[in-house]
Image: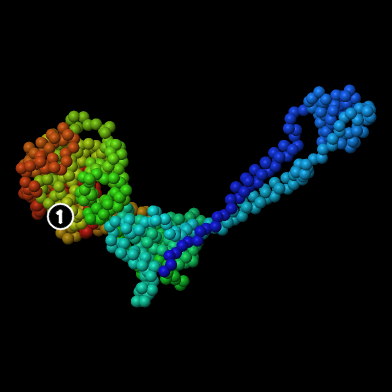
Amino acid sequence: MARFRLPRPEETPNFSRRLGTVFIVLAILAGVIAMYGAPVEEIPVIPLTEVAQKITAGEISKVSVQEDALILERTKGGKLRAIREVDSSITESLRNLGVSEDALRNVTIEVKRPSGVGFWLMTLLPSLLPFVLFALFMMFMIRSATAASNRAIGFGQVRAKPVGELPPKKKVTFRDVAGSHEAKEELMEVVEFLKHPQKFTALGARIPKGVLLVGPPGTGKTLLAKAVAGEASVPFFHMSGSEFVEMFVGVGASRVRSLFAKAKRYAPAIVFVDELDAVGRMRGAGLGGGHDEREQTLNQILVEMDGFDTEDRLIVIAATNRPDVLDPALLRPGRFDRHVTLDMPDINEREEILKVHVGQKPLAKTVNLRTVAERTPGFSGADLSNLINEAAIFAARRNKKTVGMPELFDAIEKVILGPERKSHVFSQKEKEIAATHEAGHATVAYVLPHVDPVRKISIVSRGRAGGFTLKLPDEDKHLHSRSEFLGELATLIGGYAAESLRYGEITTGAANDLKRATQLARKIVTEYGMSRFGPITFGEREEMVFLGRDLLEHRNYSEATASKIDDEVQRLLQDARAKAEEVLKTHRAKWEEVAQVLVEKETIEQEEFQALMEGVPRGEPLAAHGPEAPVPSAEAPTAPEVNQVPSGPQPEPKPAPA
């Protein structure tokens, strides 16, 4: 099959540039006229009577007549100039002034005719110039009116242009998209159908008319669409959902018709609509009912995708990270038949993505991308790209020729927590309290079983965090048990318990930990069914489509049950505090030693922390607290949204400060 090549668009003439050229030509002509009409040198002017006197006295040797001007050459050298009457000849004028015939015989009289160029310029240009300027002015007015009319008519036309074959250096292919193997396989079928449709039609197969790419932000939906454009040898139309909606009624629907009409002329072709939720939200949720401009645009999209006039060789690819707000009519078979889900990459996919992004960057020989992938659970492809870029910036700032592991680790912390706040200096007392707080988190996380290893502890301020305990799993997690949640509660309260045990009071540094612990405890009771109430959830949460991410919660339980829920949440938090205090009391010497080292060094890496805790059994189980509380396993307070971890398979969130 011959590869598709788009025709080059014809270049439209630039009227303003042409008009400027005309004015430049006129200016040159005016200069030529001035050159021919004005004297080259400055000659003194004398009256005609004085000319007669000088000729009689024999001071003039030659007289040159140029229309109404007389150029007089003196016998002693030099020139004079005079103005004569045009209606009479020069000899007649001189005789009338008393010049004798003998004096006239001694003077050479020469009559010069004007040149052809000068004559025509002087004769025609003054008459034609006003007409030329008037004609140019009328052309400009007509052109402006025509352009305004075209803009008014084309307001409802689509602005998308087909993307043809790109230069090899700029073309994005599936080889440039690491991970997402299932998504690439689904889209590769679309590319194969467009290249070789007979392969599928011979078996009676029908390719889906629409492919919907669904996934969190940064997972590579738009990049995959670019890869489809690079792989397929067909025109590729790209538009955003917001480009369809305008302030004027009917414009969005008109643009949809224009887009599909243009795409069908180039068929087989691909239409890619980015951020489909901008125009494909559920109907009946906004103001204006069926007269809403957005709903009219959506109705036109539905008709174009699967109406009476269908086009089998036109495929629509759309991307969104809000599939829950899309209209059901968009998602039915015949429109977006195939839904391709892109999840956060796992550890192997993260390693592949890192290899793609480090391709053009010089790496040190000690760099281990597997280690970097282990430290970045929950990172999307966009996060990993930003991570490599930040590492390169760190290396350049430190005047290094290569990017090493220290730069990559610093970049991870910057992406997770923000830049270091070196200007935020603790006093000695605050430094000790912060060290005690973070050492409490780390000790509880180290001692309790089934806990991810602590990678780093620091009391250096980053972003809004005064310190942090970085804990990352050895492998990706998708399921979380009740014991993990209870252990996480104990770890979150570890800093609170450490401050209380050592100083007898607490500070505001534990406020965020307590907030997250309370939210997690309430989720354990109301959403995950992991409390004394048994397998039951409380409350129904409904998302308001028109209000975006606003949620409306309905209580499906009584006030008495609400009071019991509050009691259960409080019991979970009290049990977690007792567990954390028991760990810290049992290993107080090690805990205070870690805090002292933190005060001195401000940062402790994983190897040094494990050396400090040597002699303490890793994952040592302790007696459970509270009725029917299982042996908990804590998770260090490093997950950014641990209070939102669902019970089903989900990607591990990125770490955040404790």
What residue is shown at x 46% (from left), y 62% (from top)? 5
Nearest the camera: 556 or 552?
A: 552
The picture quadrant where one finds residue 395 is top left
Image coordinates for residue 313, horizontal then vertical, percent: 42, 69
On the picture, is 118 further left or further right than 606?
right
What residue is shown at x 66% (from left), y 51% (from top)? 139
Image coordinates for residue 569, horizontal then vertical, percent: 17, 50
Nearest the camera: 658 or 517?
A: 658
What residue is shown at x 9% (from left), y 52% (from top)? 631
Image coordinates for residue 401, horizontal then vertical, percent: 28, 40
On the picture, is 1 further left or further right than 441?
right
Q: How is the image coloured?
A: rainbow
Nearest the camera: 307 or 40?
A: 40
Residue 390 lies, with reference to residue 185, above or below; the image says above
Amino acid type for the residue under numbered disc 1: Arg
On the picture, is 123 further left or further right than 588?
right
What residue is shown at x 81% (from left), y 31% (from top)? 71
The residue singled out by tag 1 in the image is 482
On the picture, is 542 further left or further right than 368?
right
The picture quadrant where one finds residue 94 is top right
Neighbours of disc 1 within 10 Å: few (<14), some (14-19), many (20+): some
Residue 337 lies, with reference to residue 588, above or below; the image says below
Image quadrant occupied by the C terminus: top left
- Would residue 644 be seen by someone viewing this image from the given angle? no
The picture quadrant where one finds residue 88 is top right
Residue 589 lies, with reference to residue 533, above or below; the image says above
Image coordinates for residue 479, horizontal then vertical, percent: 19, 57
